Image (cartoon, grey):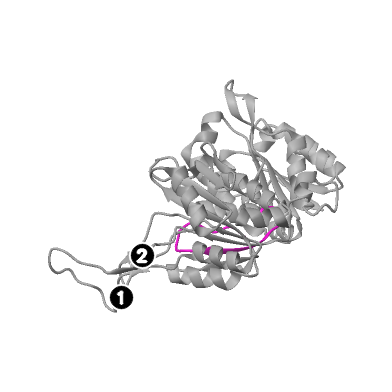
Amino acid sequence: MLIALGVTGGIGAYKAVEVARGLQKRGHEVVAIMTASATKFVGPVTFEAITRRRVITDQFESGANSDIEHIALASSIDLLLVAPATANILGKFANGLADDFLSTLYTATRAPVLVAPAMNTNMFAHEAVRRNLDALAARGVRFVDPGEGYLACGWIGKGRLAEPDEIVAAAEAILRPTGTGPAPREAAASVLGGRRVIVTAGPTYEDVDPVRFIGNRSSGRMGFAIAAEAARRGADVTLIMGPTAVEPPAVRDVVKVRSAADMHDAVIGLADRADLVVMAAAVADYSPVERAAQKVHKAGETLTLVLRKTPDILGELGRRRLAAGRGPVLVGFAAETERVSEQAEAKRAHKHVDLIVANDVSRSDAGFEVDTNAVTIVGAHGAEVLPLMTKTRAAAEILDRVERLLAGSPAATRALRN
């Protein structure tokens, strides 16, 4: 397979030489793309000698773009791997900037993208960098996390480029996810591979009139992270999303809805053919009984709205499965502000579902409108409290536990569901 290896300007660029060599040992062809800054750390001739291909260093090099090279390469590669990936290139990727060959290639290719960030500890923790990482994750970009240790700047902390063997293994897990080659065992054995998965994400909007609606603060990031992670593990993912400005990940199908009723119809219509349903959306509990045909103008000191309860999508799925004795694994979410575990367990039992993922949305660093989450996963065997982490990492932790359910024997699974 052909891999485009992007090398950016960091001291970890020297490790990219070993990454290229490791990929070649696995039978892949490698073409190197170096930013101008990368050439200050490692000479292009080094990569040229290893890959036996011309190294691309300039988008406007004479003769290099006679066939619109970034488009030709974008169409032919099987993977775009960037190692090291600096804060600068992450910002370009996340915001659609394309001012050099590598960033242009990223916007043009539809191949999977894997990045290995490397930078100063404080830079890696900066809010802008974290937002860029989460934006890329929501689009399906995969990551090899940096290591911890002594950095070139003299600091000690997280930010050092992952070791070449780790990066090569991550690339292999993407290129050979079904065990057709020497991919890592855990990637080849993913229980979600080939499964039909439905993920809901974002808020619902319940219209009061043509101008106003009742909504909530959900951005959809947690659901998007789960959908992206399920797709990475080989699942056939349908994402049903409410209104949000966050870009959804690249999955098989994206269904856009607005109201709780819309989401109910979309989920129920697909659930019978699913192996797993993850209800991460913040679905409105109540909706106006009547939607005014025209804008409601201000009059009087108060306004009374009459609301009715919306359909309980997760509860309906649980009851249908209980009655039929079969159906998908069900995972719900609970946004709470107090007694998180207690409320989540009551919800799990009442709705007859396998797992409830609960979080305290009163926290400023978890839940709505932030890139991190601290969840409690409640199942038949009790509650498991996870520490604060990125939503991308939380999605992986949740799906690890879902895979254990899917891998269980039919008898054990039935017992768990009842």
Kindly tell me whether residue 151 is visible in this rendering: no
**Residue at position x 85%, y 46% in the image:** 182
Check contact, mark 1 vs mark 2: CB within 8 A: no
Look at the image and give the residue range highlighted in magenta. Answer: 232-251
Q: Which residue is mark 1?
A: 290
* Vertical order, 109 against 7 (above or below): below
Q: Is the stretch drawn in magenta largely helix, strand or loop? A: loop
Left or right, residue 347 beside residue 291: right
Q: CA distance from mark 1 to mark 2?
A: 12 Å
User: Residue 406: x and y, percent?
Assistant: 69, 54
Which residue extends farthest left? 300
Q: Nearer the viewer, residue 69 or 373?
A: 373
Estimate the x, y position of residue 190 in percent, counting from the top left.
Answer: 74, 51
Question: Which label was assigned to residue 286?
Answer: 2
Circle 2 Cα neighbour tier, 10 Å, few/some/many (<14 / 14–19 / ≥20): some
- Horizontal side of residue 152 vs 315, given as left or right: right
Query: Please, what is the three-letter code of the amino acid marked with disc 2?
Result: Tyr
Picture residue at 65% right of the left edge, 46% below the top: 400
Query: How far from the left and from the top, in percent, is residue 29?
Result: 83, 49
| Residue 301 part of the magenta segment | no
User: Can residue 322 be seen?
Assistant: yes
- Of residue 187 and residue 65, the one placed in the foreground of this image is 187
Q: Within the image, what quadrant is residue 338 found in?
A: top left
**Residue type at numbered disc 1:** Glu
**Residue at position x 21%, y 67% from top?**
304
Query: Residue 394 occupies which quadrant of the picture?
Result: top right
- Is residue 277 depicted above or below 207 in this figure? above
Q: Secondary structure at mark 2?
A: strand
Q: Residues within 10 Å of mark 1 (few under 14, many from 20)?
A: few
- For the C terminus, give its image quadrant: bottom right
Residue positioned 54% across, 68% down in the render: 267
Q: In terms of depth relative to the viewer, which is nearer, 191 or 107?
A: 191
